[in-house]
Image (spheres, grey):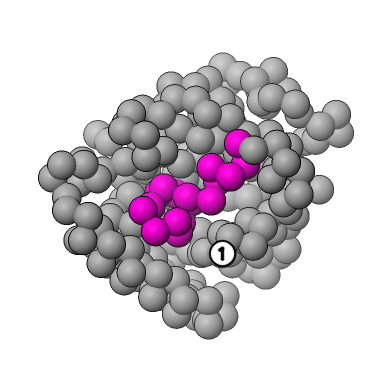
Amino acid sequence: MVNRWCISSPLWGEFFRADEEDEEERQASEEAQYARTLSLAELYSINRDFIGWMTVGNTIDYPVVRGADNSKYINTTFTGGNNTAGSIFMDYRNSNGFDEQVCIIYGHHTRDGSMFSPLARYLDPAYLQGNPNISITTKDGVKLNYKVFAATLTDAWDIAYTVGVSESASATEVFPNVPESASRFLMLSTCTRSGDEDERIIVFAAAS
């Protein structure tokens, strides 16, 4: 079984040439541009795993899916194609979707800066302060708003990954700088391109 938090592929390194990676990312970008022209109903008709559309600041703008496990969408695009850029996907254990107290969402850190690559910018406090807004429209048309309140460079074994999917920790105990009135959260996760396959960037946001 693939590590449920790992958004790296063995193809990222010496086994995958940069030009091939660039081509796959170009194809994934074209697909994303096409998806942005579709209605929620059309998106759901293409992929029944579609659960909503996410916009993070001015840099991340993608459909979100949830599969039967955390392996499917690592190398599968929204329309079902095999592509190392994968999809933006929610942890399969968040069975209630965006109604969960904590939703964990994963995406690749790509060479071309697409998918969840911009999350690295949130490690800069000034960027976080100036770009806190996350908006989600669920497949049913419900609009949700979140504010980013923290970001951290960590690893795949961080206890934060258990929050909302086990009873071993709560957000107020584990997440950094939790706003006093916060009760529902997003946790956005991506790998880095440092060469350390266990290294992760996590961005934390609270419903507003």
Q: Quadrant of the N terminus?
A: top left
Q: 44 and 131: which one is in front? A: 131
Q: Position of residue 190 (x, y in %)?
A: 46, 41
Residue 104 in the image: above or below residue 61:
above
Residue 110 is covered by the magenta coloring: yes
| Residue 185 percent coordinates (x, y) | 68, 39
Residue 144 appears in which quarter of the rendering?
bottom right
Residue 141 magenta-highlighted = no
In this rendering, the answer to whether 55 lies above or below 148 is below
Q: Secondary structure at mark 1?
A: strand
Q: How many marks?
A: 1
Residue ID for mark 1:
61
Q: Is residue 203 left or right of residue 49?
A: right
The answer to whether residue 80 shows anywhere in this view is no
Identified at 53% across, 20% down, the residue is 159
Q: Is residue 25 visible?
A: yes
Residue at image point 40% right, 49% down? 108
Q: Which residues are magenta?
A: 107-123
